[in-house]
Image (tube, rainbow, N blue to C red):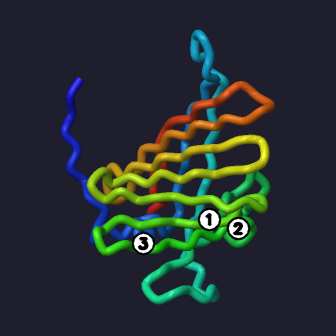
Amino acid sequence: MSSSFSYSVPNNDFAKYLIGRWKRSLKCQYFGPSLPFVGGNNSVLIIEEETEAISEPGTLFLNWKVMKSGDSTAEDAKVAFCMQVFPNSDGSSNMQWEYHGHNCEGFFHPQASSATLMFKDDAGTMTVVNRAVDENTMAVCIVEVDNQFMPVMQFGTMARIVQ
């Protein structure tokens, strides 16, 4: 199977590309002999620039919020984490944030228009790959592995909610 892919994030600025509201739709499967289907989920992510954070010159802070089923407005959504983005001279970016008391990191690869985010905690890891497909769509793949449950793979899309 062969396909062509040619979208590039404008100015290699993944942080600015992320800003907005996104509908994330995922399917979920366990890793196992038959990759059993677990289910799916939909959520709304709100990614906003954090203007009150004191950042180093050239860096940007992004608040990641997840709207829960009881949230009626974006203002009701709570910040899940605040990510600091460090652009590099080659167009790539490094990312750092704290999640549930653990330091996490990520990397934006401009040639692939993709970012890999690594969440860590005491029980395991979650790796998230977001690939920009066009100005309003990302492909998403998530792999969760911990010491308590069967490993899980989630995959789907994020679509920008244009207002």
Mark 1 vs 2, N-terminal side: 1
The percent position of residue 4, horizontal first and vertical second, equals 19, 39
Q: Which residue is mark 2?
A: 79
The percent position of residue 31, horizontal first and vertical second, equals 61, 22
Q: Secondary structure at mark 2?
A: strand
Asked whether the beta carbons under mark 1 and mark 2 sit within 8 Å of each other, the answer is yes
Q: Which residue is mark 3?
A: 16
Q: Quadrant of residue 3?
A: top left
Q: CA distance from mark 3 to mark 1?
A: 13 Å
Q: CA distance from mark 1 to mark 2?
A: 6 Å
Q: Secondary structure at mark 1?
A: strand
The percent position of residue 83, horizontal first and vertical second, equals 59, 69
Q: Quadrant of residue 81?
A: bottom right
Asked whether the beta carbons under mark 3 and mark 1 sit within 8 Å of each other, the answer is no
Q: In the rendered structure, which amino acid carries the disc numbered 3? A: Lys
Q: In the rendered structure, which amino acid carries the disc numbered 1? A: Trp
Left or right, 159 with respect to 84, comes to left
